[in-house]
Image (cartoon, rainbow, N blue to C red):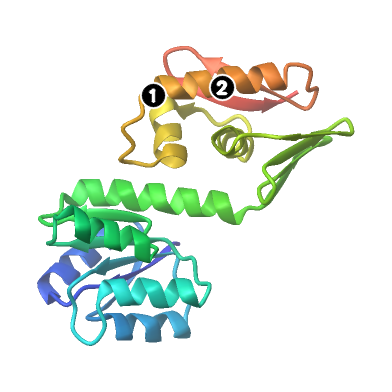
C-alpha cells in the first residue's frame, strides 16, 4: 500500500484529503506544517507528499527545497489557494512535481496522485530485461544482440513502461498521463507517432513486439 503524507494547516481540509485518499486505498499521515512533515519523513518512508504552500513554521516552498537539497526525490503535489503564475513557477522551481489550485476537485486530485505514483515507480525501476534485451533507465539505452541504442527520453519511457508489464494493455490516455504528465496539452496522437518510431527501431528484435489493440491502445508482448 502506498503511503502518502499530507502537509496542510487547515484541519478540515487535511481530514477531507485523508478520508478521500484512504477510501481510494492509500495509507495517509497528516501534519499541519513543513517542519512536522520533515519529522515524519525522517521517521518513515512515504511514496508521495501533498503539501499546501502557506503554512506556519515552515511553508511548502521551504519543505520542498529542504527535501531536494537532501537528495530526497519523493514526488510532491503542491496544493494552494495561490493561482498566480509566479506562485506556480516558484513551486516548480523549488522542486515540486505537480500543482493544483484550490478549490480542489477531489476526483482530479486522485487522478494526479495516481499518475505521480506511476511515474515515480517507473523511475525507481532502473533496469529491465526481456530475453536478451536490456533496458537501462540511467542511460536511456536498449541493448540487444550486442548492439546498444540510446533512445530519446519519451520513447525510452514509453517502451520501458509497457515492457514492465508484458501483455498488459495501455490506453493512449494512460500512456499520456504517465509519460507526458496528467495536465499535458499534447495530443494523444503523439503516442501513436512514438509507437511508430519504436516499431521501426525494433522491427528485428526477437525478444518482444509492440501490439496494437485496435480502438483501445497498445501492449508489449514477449516473442
Q: Is residue 118 left or right of residue 203?
A: left
Judge by depth and name the residue closer to the eye, 210 or 70: 70
Q: Residue at x 70, y 21 (%)?
A: 201
Disc 1 is placed on an element classified as: loop
Where 130 sits versus 58, above or below? Answer: above
Residue 181 appears in the rendering:
yes
Q: Circle 2 is placed at which residue position?
A: 195
Judge by depth and name the residue closer to the eye, 222 or 120: 120
Residue 45 appears in the rendering:
no
Q: Position of residue 192 (x, y in %)?
A: 49, 19
Where 113 sits versus 195, above or below? Answer: below
Tags 1 and 2 in contact by the CB under 8 Å rule? no
Q: Circle 1 is placed at which residue position?
A: 188
Q: Position of residue 20 (x, y in %)?
A: 22, 59
Q: Position of residue 106 (x, y in %)?
A: 19, 52
Q: Is residue 148 left or right of residue 190?
A: right
Q: Residue at x 18, y 70 (%)?
A: 15
Where 219 sits versus 56, above or below? Answer: above
Amino acid at each position: 500500500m502506498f503511503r502518502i503524507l499530507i502537509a496542510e494547516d487547515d484541519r478540515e481540509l487535511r481530514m477531507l484529503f485523508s478520508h478521500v485518499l484512504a477510501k481510494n486505498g492509500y495509507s495517509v499521515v497528516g501534519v499541519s506544517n513543513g517542519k512536522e512533515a520533515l519529522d515524519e519523513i525522517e521517521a518513515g518512508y512515504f511514496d508521495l507528499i501533498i503539501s499546501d504552500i502557506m503554512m506556519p513554521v515552515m511553508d511548502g516552498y521551504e519543505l520542498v527545497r529542504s527535501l531536494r537539497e537532501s537528495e530526497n526525490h519523493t514526488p510532491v503535489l503542491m496544493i494552494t489557494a495561490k493561482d498566480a503564475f509566479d506562485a506556480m513557477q516558484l513551486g516548480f522551481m523549488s522542486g515540486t512535481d505537480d500543482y493544483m489550485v484550490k478549490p480542489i476537485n477531489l476526483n482530479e486530485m486522485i487522478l494526479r496522485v495516481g499518475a505521480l505514483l506511476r511515474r515515480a515507480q517507473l523511475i525507481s525501476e532502473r533496469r529491465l530485461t526481456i530475453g536478451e534485451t536490456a533496458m537501462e533507465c540511467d542511460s536511456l539505452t536498449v541493448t540487444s544482440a550486442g548492439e546498444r541504442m540510446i533512445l530519446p527520453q519519451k520513447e525510452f519511457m514509453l517502451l520501458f513502461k509497457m515492457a514492465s508489464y508484458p501483455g498488459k494493455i495501455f490506453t493512449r490516455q494512460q500512456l499520456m498521463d504517465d509519460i507526458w504528465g496528467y495536465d499535458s496539452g499534447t495530443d494523444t496522437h503523439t503516442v501513436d507517432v512514438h509507437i511508430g518510431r519504436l516499431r521501426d527501431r525494433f522491427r528485428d528484435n526477437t525478444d518482444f513486439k509492440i501490439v496494437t489493440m485496435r480502438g483501445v491502445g497498445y501492449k508489449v508482448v514477449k516473442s
